């Protein structure tokens, strides 16, 4: 096993390790592949999708694909028997504070997953292990995850990742 391979932790979640990131990855392409896989897995659910342009980011393609797949797979679980509307938007994170963690030429992007499902504390407790897994992947990619109740904010997931628009 090489140092860049993931290892399983006691709870079945892979323990990822930091690896050097070299070439930019299209989050648009990764998202498209992930949504195809999720729709194939959930035959009865079809997303009505609108996705804005996503940035290029750096990292391991397999981990970012897994991140999107995991996030998308939690959405149908909250909407049995109904059409799932999904709007993914992306904006550059604004702020007056300089982010010293970002490499030169990169900006931090906020990607929000708006949907028509409603969530509650029960949904969040059912998905706690998956949410922890997503946070672990994002942490290694210098990102973060925020989960919100739709009634309060209008979006379910909000992730931040460094990247650039090409």
Image (cartoon, rainbow, N blue to C red):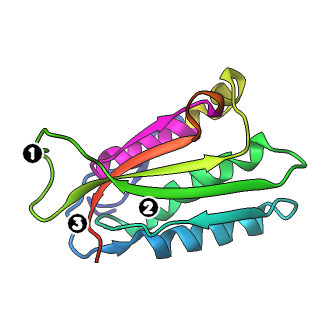
Q: Quadrant of the N terminus?
A: bottom left
Which residue is pictured at 87% across the width and 49% down the height?
Answer: 82
Q: How crowded is mark 2: few (under 14 residues within 10 Å), some or many (20 or more)?
A: many
Q: In which quarter of the image is residue 87?
A: bottom right
Residue 50, quarter of picture: bottom right
- Observer-side mark, 1 or 2, equals 1
* Residue in the image at 31% along x and 64% along y: 59
Ranked by sequence position, the earlier of labels 3 and 2 is: 3
C-alpha separation, residue under disc 1 versus residue under disc 3: 17 Å
Q: Residue at x 75, y 49 (%)?
A: 76
Res. 12 visible in picture? no
Q: Which of marks 1 and 3 is nearer the N terminus?
A: 3
Q: Where is residue 100 in the image (x, y as percent from the top left)?
A: 9, 45
- Estimate the x, y position of residue 58 in percent, counting from the top left: 28, 65
For residue 26: magenta? Answer: no
SS label for mark 3: loop
Q: Is residue 8 above or below residue 41?
A: above
Label 1 packing within 10 angstroms: few (<14), some (14-19), many (20+) = few
Residue 131 vertical position relative to residue 81 in the rendered view, above or below: above
Residues 91 and 160: in front is 91
Dot label at residue 118: none
Secondary structure at badge 1 equals: loop
Question: What's drawn in magenta, residue-wise?
Answer: 130-150
Query: Badges 1 and 2: C-beta atoms under 8 Å apart?
Result: no
State the residue position of label 2: 64
Label 3: few (<14), some (14–19) or many (≥20) C-alpha neighbours in 10 Å: few
Horizontal side, residue 134 vs residue 96: left or right: right
Q: Name the residue under label 3.
A: 21
- In this rendering, does residue 50 appear at all? yes
Q: What element carries label 2?
A: helix
Which residue position holds label 1? 100
| Depth check, front residue: 139 or 50 | 50
């Amino acid at each position: 096993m090489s140092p860049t391979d993931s290892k399983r932790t006691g709870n079945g979640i892979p323990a990822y390790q930091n690896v050097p990131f070299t070439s930019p990855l299209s989050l648009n392409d990764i998202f498209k592949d992930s949504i195809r896989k999720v729709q194939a897995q959930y035959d009865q659910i079809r997303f009505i999708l609108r996705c804005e342009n996503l940035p290029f980011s750096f990292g391991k393609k397999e981990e970012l694909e897994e991140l999107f797949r995991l996030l998308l797979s939690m959405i149908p679980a909250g909407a049995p028997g109904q059409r799932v509307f999904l709007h993914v938007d992306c904006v550059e994170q604004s702020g007056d504070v300089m982010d010293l963690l970002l490499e030169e030429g990169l900006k931090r992007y906020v990607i929000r997953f708006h949907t028509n499902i409603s969530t509650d504390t029960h949904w969040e407790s059912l998905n706690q292990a998956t949410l922890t897994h997503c946070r672990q992947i994002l942490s290694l990619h210098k990102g973060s995850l925020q989960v919100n109740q739709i009634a309060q904010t209008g979006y379910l997931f909000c992730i931040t990742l460094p990247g650039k628009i090409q």
